[in-house]
Image (cartoon, rainbow, N blue to C red):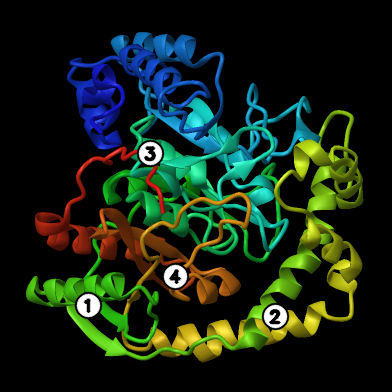
Amino acid sequence: MNDPHDASSALAYLSAEEVQRRLDDHSLTSRQLIDTLLERIEAIDVAGTAVALNSIAATSDDARALAQVRDDERAQGISRGPLHGIPVLIKDNIEALGLPATAGSTALAGRPTRDATLVTRLRDAGAIILASTNLSQWANMRSLRSSSGWSATAGLVGNPWALDRSAGGSSSGSGAALAAGLAPLAVGTETDGSIVCPSSVNGIVGLKPTVGVVPATYVVPISASQDSPGPMGRTVGDVALLFGVLSATPPPATIDALTFSAATNWRTGNPETDRRFDEVMVALRDGGLRIIDRELALPSSQEYEDELAVLLGELSDDLSAYLAGRPGAGVASLADVVAYEDEHRSIEQPYFGHEFFIQALATGGRAGVAYADARRRNLEWAVNTCLTPGLEGVDVILAPAYGPSWKSDLAVGGHPGPASVATMAPAIAGWPILCMPMGLVQGLPVGLAIIGRSGSEWTVLEAARRVEAVISETRRLPRPFWSAPQRG
């Protein structure tokens, strides 16, 4: 299928850096870009259209007016910052004035919102908050059978590469919207895999920063020890641009020669994806990058059980505290959410339940008997057994992320099939991980994960830039194919 809205495609796929240049040379205005992107959203994302991507939760009422303000400021020689007049999408679990921030649940519909700290940083840098993006409801921490990309408020997000395939979770709308050319930049959130997965399966770049580097104030939480908002874009340069604003940190003047390790035993289980990773390692070595092959620790069932125990304990405390402090009437605790979803079962639980919520309530939170030991064991494995040895003598770890996207299936659940364990240790440790495209497998994108030490985001981004420079010559992705659903 050709691009489903040819009239907007020329502007739709401009990078943020290209938008900057065109705004500066006056060959484009923010108002022209915002008008075009809103037209594209209306044409291909909304239910009832030919595509109905469902990646957008709500558009900002003031986007056009703000675009005109930014244009007027630019004409007067005023620049608010590096994102002046550039549209940005935010995930619907991030609060922003004028957008719903429902986390995909009707339990939060109509509640007043505030500007999250990260949104204030975006606005101060001149960005235009164009829209909020659909997501896996409650950031995919509700049920083992939850379908990635589905929410009660906005339905199921499609994947622009193949409309019957998953857009990943939980930042599914952010990933799909970028791949669909609905904006140049987006913000997602990750607890374990929720930026990396949609970046991998939608063929974009996403960075989950070290926990705490980007503030999570007024972001609907799961886990204070693992949650992190992060930048998403179609190029490494765009992600670096957005990260600088979100983190309020400048890039270093220079980064010296980098050494990489390749996690040879962190495989996805999809033969063609794992073969592609090996081919990319050869290409990077041929391109002059120094890469050391290394086997890293693999998680046992104990690590998975411990991570779940930690997430459930923190969910019980952190979501209840957030709900109690959010303005407006409505659910004020996790127990209230469970009661609400049971009362509105046909809307909130048509395909799967909320077993994790019930389990979280039974944990007793951080004060529960299981939490402290589980967190201690988890950190020992992630930091001391896995990441520290893996990074010894090198700057970053390389690994395949996910195999090609799987078919969405609301009846049986939509969690990914082929995936490596690359997200788990950095998620538990709270360390940074980036995902970028490494080519197509079976006509669908697959991603390369890059993991660094705590606080090393700029090193990770520089590593990604060097990888991108080598592999983009032969593996630069085309635009999505927009293939129609297939049988089988």
The residue identified by callout 3 is: 178
The correct choice, above or below, for 230 with respect to 151 in the image is below
- Which of discs 4 and 3 lies nearer the camera? The answer is 4
Type of amino acid under label 1: Asp
Question: Mark 2 packing: few (<14 Cα in 10 Å), some, or many (20+)?
Answer: few
The residue identified by callout 4 is: 419
Whether residue 203 is visible: yes
Q: Residue at x 36, y 68 (%)?
A: 450
- Which of discs 2 and 4 lies nearer the camera? The answer is 4
Q: CA distance from mark 2 to mark 4?
A: 18 Å
Of labels 1 and 2, earlier in sequence is 1
Q: CA distance from mark 1 to mark 3?
A: 27 Å
- Left or right: residue 156 versus residue 432 is right
Could you say which is closer to the camera, residue 469 or residue 341? Answer: 341
The residue identified by callout 2 is: 305
Q: Position of residue 200 (x, y in %)?
A: 38, 57
The residue identified by callout 1 is: 278
Is disc 4 placed on a helix, strand or loop?
loop
The correct choice, above or below, for 379 with respect to 7 in the image is below
Could you say which is closer to the camera, residue 270 or residue 191? Answer: 270
Q: Quadrant of the C terminus?
A: bottom left
Q: Position of residue 392 (x, y in %)?
A: 37, 88
User: Which residue is the extreme one toward the front?
Assistant: 487
Type of amino acid under label 2: Glu
